[in-house]
Image (tube, helix red, strand yellow):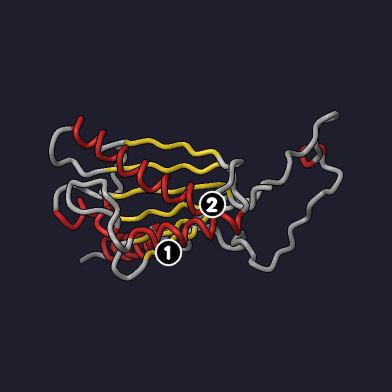
Amino acid sequence: MTTTNRLALTLTAATLMAAVLTAPAHADDGPSVPPGTEPSASAPVNVDANDPDLKLPEGATLAEPKVLDIKQVVEDQSGDERREDTNADVKFALQAEVLFGKDSAKLGGEARSRISAIAEEIKIQKATRIRVFGFTDNLGSSAHGDVLSRRRANAVEGVLEQELNDPNITFEVRGYGEQYPIASNATEASRKKNRRVEVSFPRGEN
């Protein structure tokens, strides 16, 4: 090999080496942001208290403070009775089986004591507007469910009226039949939850 050829090869190798050493690194090999511009966790945030964007427009006022309505639900171990408390209302749900016989609106022996306990809570809350709503599952005809749920609601209202004995109290009584289920009607266990009477009233009414 001539001296000229060796010199050419040497220069070519040197050029390739320089190209490798000066080539930019692959994106995966480097930082996600340019060096020296990473955000600092300890950097203070300056807020301008006079920034017009932080002030209410002239003549505007803040909305009245509002207390969030929080619901608390307590259900006895058997599931026969459930109580729901919110900031505004108290609601008791009694499963039909603890109040009535099958397909009946006649109150059973245990029914009065449970309804009496609800009446005592109504007195404590000094409520004067009571809602008594009856519900059934989806078995049988819809018309039959409507009638049965209304008869059951009437029966519960009758006991409450006797227990409270207050002419200032007004009752709203309705039978909704299979409307507004609280569980699926696919199984007997879930249908049992839907067969119920609900008694609700405002909390702490004066």
The mark that comes first in sequence, 1 or 2, is: 1
Quick one: SS at disc 1?
strand
- Give amino acid for label 1: Val
Q: Position of residue 113 (x, y in %)?
A: 40, 63
* Residue annotated with mark 2: 164
Quick one: SS at disc 2?
helix
Of 77 and 43, nearer the camera is: 77
Density class for disc 2 (Cα within 10 Å; few <14, some 14-19, many ≥20) is some
- Left or right of 109 on screen, residue 61: right
Q: Does residue 23 show up?
A: no
Q: Does residue 5 show up?
A: yes
Of 113 and 68, nearer the camera is: 113
Q: Are marks 1 and 2 in contact (CB under 8 Å)?
A: no
- Give amino acid for label 2: Leu
* Residue annotated with mark 1: 74
Density class for disc 1 (Cα within 10 Å; few <14, some 14-19, many ≥20) is few
C-alpha span from label 1 to label 2:
24 Å
Q: Residue at x 42, y 57 (%)?
A: 115
> Mark 1, mark 2: which one is toward the viewer?
2
